[in-house]
């Protein structure tokens, strides 16, 4: 009997060149791919022999429930299928990959984790923002801005400007995040950035000050990563060079810059 295997694969931030070789290999072998909304068509084409099933939120339609995704993976693996659960960025960074791994382990199904390039590092990186830089920052904190409970305790526990702050899923809650940071003593002029659609042809980059962050118009439908800290200043110098040499990874359009 064929042994099934579920691979929890990180697709990276969007661009096909940013999935790992191990991830691409698993896709090539896959018979079933369950993929999230942010995964690009080009990456799915790496799985030519697989049945591809979208399970993420699409065009206002709700995502498949976590329980039904887990059931699908377990059933297919028990039938001996090679399954890829393809998730944006890294499966274990704010993506519920841990829950899926626990469900697979609990069901006694063979599985593996193929890490991916998280947008937490790829989005700033492509914009020319090093998350750490000697003399400016020796740590970075990644937090979900999705809800107050997810970020408030982290932001309240962080002394102002002691680390670069990276916020995922935070575009819709910028106002609350900015006012909390200002109340905690972060300087209004702290450099800040929004890297949207990083590594895709639609990518945009805004850089400015912390106290301007909430007023930046949102790029429609694009996922965005917020970066706050002195290292953002380096994007003016590094970003323009880096992007010029990486046209295939999507050109950043800087639509508002700090003066
Ligand atoms: C549910 S989280 C998943 C994160 C993912 N596991 C990772 O490691 O990148 C989705 C958030 O990631 C960020 N994100 C995903 N793709 C992005 C991209 N191409 N550019 C900028 N941010 C992105 C956004 O903050 C988005 O709201």
Image: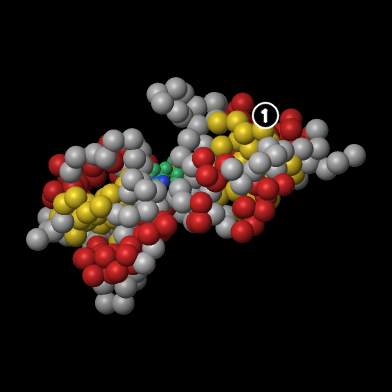
In-image side of 25 versus 3 (left or right)? left
Q: What element carries label 1?
A: helix
Quadrant for residue 239, please give it. Answer: bottom left
Disc 1 under 8 Å from ligand 1? The reply is no
Q: Mark 1 points at which residue?
A: 71
Decide if residue 175 is in sight here. Answer: no
Question: How many numbered markers are drawn?
Answer: 1
Tell me the residue at 49%/42% (across/down).
40
Q: In which quarter of the image is the N terminus?
A: top right
Q: Residue at x 29, y 69 (%)?
A: 241
**For residue 201, above or below residue 187:** above
**Which colouring convention does the figure follow?**
secondary structure
Judge by depth and name the residue closer to the eye, 132 or 158: 132
| Rendered position, 209 above or below 133 | above
Q: Against 237, is 55 above or below?
A: above
Please report the residue visible at 13 percent of the width from the left and 50 percent of the height from the top: 211
247 with respect to 181 (left or right): right
Front-most of 117 and 53?
Answer: 53
Q: Where is residue 121 in the image (x, y as percent from the top left)?
A: 41, 58
- Residue 104 is situated, as x and y percent measured from the top left of the image, at 69, 40
Q: Which residue is drawn at 37% across and 48% down?
A: 201
Q: In which quarter of the image is residue 19?
A: bottom right
Q: In which quarter of the image is the C terminus?
A: bottom left
Q: Can residue 217 be seen in this view?
A: yes
Residue 179 in the image, given as x and y percentages of width and height: 17, 45
Q: In which quarter of the image is residue 129?
A: bottom left
What residue occupies the far left of the structure in this picture?
259
Q: How dense is the environment of label 1, judged by Cα within 10 Å: few (below 14), some, or many (20 and up)?
A: some
Q: Which residue lies furthest to the right in this view?
A: 1
Which residue, as the protein is rendered here, is positioned at the far bottom?
134
């Amino acid at each position: 009997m064929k042994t099934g295997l579920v691979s929890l694969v990180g697709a990276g931030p969007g661009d096909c060149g940013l999935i790992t070789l191990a991830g691409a290999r698993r896709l090539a072998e896959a018979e079933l791919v369950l993929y999230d909304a942010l995964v690009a068509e080009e990456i799915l084409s790496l799985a030519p022999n697989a049945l591809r099933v979208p399970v993420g939120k699409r065009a206002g339609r709700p995502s498949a429930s976590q329980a039904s995704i887990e059931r699908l993976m377990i059933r297919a693996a028990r039938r001996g299928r090679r399954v890829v659960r393809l998730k944006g960025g890294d499966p274990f960074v704010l993506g519920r990959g841990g829950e899926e791994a626990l469900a697979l382990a609990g069901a006694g199904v063979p599985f593996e984790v193929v890490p991916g390039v998280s947008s937490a590092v790829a989005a700033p990186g492509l914009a020319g923002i090093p998350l750490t830089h000697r003399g400016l920052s020796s740590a970075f904190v990644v937090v979900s801005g999705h809800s107050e409970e997810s970020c408030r305790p982290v932001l309240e526990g962080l002394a102002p400007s002691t680390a670069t702050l990276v916020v995922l899923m935070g575009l819709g809650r910028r106002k609350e995040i900015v006012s909390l940071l200002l109340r905690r003593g972060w300087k209004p002029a702290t450099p800040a950035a929004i890297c949207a659609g990083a590594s895709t042809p639609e990518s945009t980059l805004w850089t400015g000050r912390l106290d301007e962050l909430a007023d930046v118009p949102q790029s429609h439908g694009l996922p965005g990563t917020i970066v706050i800290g002195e290292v953002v200043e380096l994007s003016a110098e590094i970003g323009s060079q880096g992007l010029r040499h990486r046209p295939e990874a999507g050109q950043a359009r800087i639509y508002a810059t700090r003066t």
